[in-house]
């Protein structure tokens, strides 16, 4: 076979493979859309479980304690801030409300 003919046939083969791959991908999409709700829910739960168990990076115990401490301190500080603002604003607005 001349080189030009082999190159053309190789190009046709690649184009056919690409076309077949696209049609397979489209069939996969159609199958997923046509699945009933229970199949989709079970697939979602299964994939979520795999993601949580195998793919997620969980903190170590010391990191977890440190992060928990930071969150508790932040909640207490913000709670004191909001409580202080509430107290101050209630003292400022009480005379306006009690004038009636």
Image (cartoon, rainbow, N blue to C red):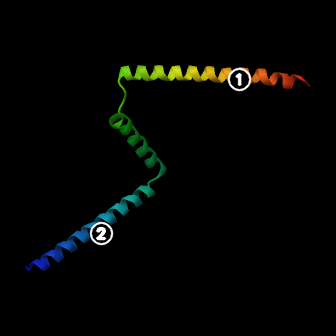
**Quadrant housing residue 53:** top left
Q: Report, in whole angstroms, how far the alpha carbon at label 2 lies from the one at label 1.
A: 67 Å
| Vertical side of 6 occupied by 54: above or below | above
Image location (x, y in percent) of residue 8? 18, 77
Residue 87 picture location, percent across and down: 72, 20
Q: Choose between 55 and 60: the one closer to the eye.
A: 60
In which quadrant is the N terminus drawn? bottom left
The residue closer to the viewer here, 1 or 62, is 62
Q: 50 and 92: which one is in front?
A: 92
Q: Which mark is residue 86?
A: 1
Q: Residue at x 42, y 19 (%)?
A: 65
- Please, which residue is most extreme toward the left here? 1
Tags 2 and 1 in contact by the CB under 8 Å rule? no
Dot 2 or dot 1: first in sequence order is: 2
**Residue 19: which disc?**
2
Q: Quadrant of residue 23?
A: bottom left
**Which of the image's four quarters has the C terminus?**
top right
Q: Position of residue 58 (x, y in %)?
A: 36, 29
Q: Residue at x 13, y 79 (%)?
A: 4
Q: Based on the displayed image, in which of its 4 quarters is residue 62 positioned?
A: top left
Answer above or below: position of 47 versus 93. below
Label 2: which secondary element = helix
Left or right of 31 on screen, residue 78: right
Pair 2/1: label in front:
1
């Amino acid at each position: 076979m001349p080189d030009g003919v082999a190159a053309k046939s190789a190009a046709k083969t690649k184009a056919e493979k690409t076309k077949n791959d696209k049609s397979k991908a489209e069939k996969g999409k159609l199958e997923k859309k046509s699945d009933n709700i229970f199949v989709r829910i079970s697939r979602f739960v299964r994939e979520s479980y795999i993601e949580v168990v195998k793919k997620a990076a969980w903190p170590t115990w010391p990191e977890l304690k440190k992060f928990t401490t930071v969150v508790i301190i932040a909640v207490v500080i913000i709670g004191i801030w909001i409580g202080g603002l509430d107290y101050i604003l209630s003292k400022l607005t009480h005379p306006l409300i009690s004038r009636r």
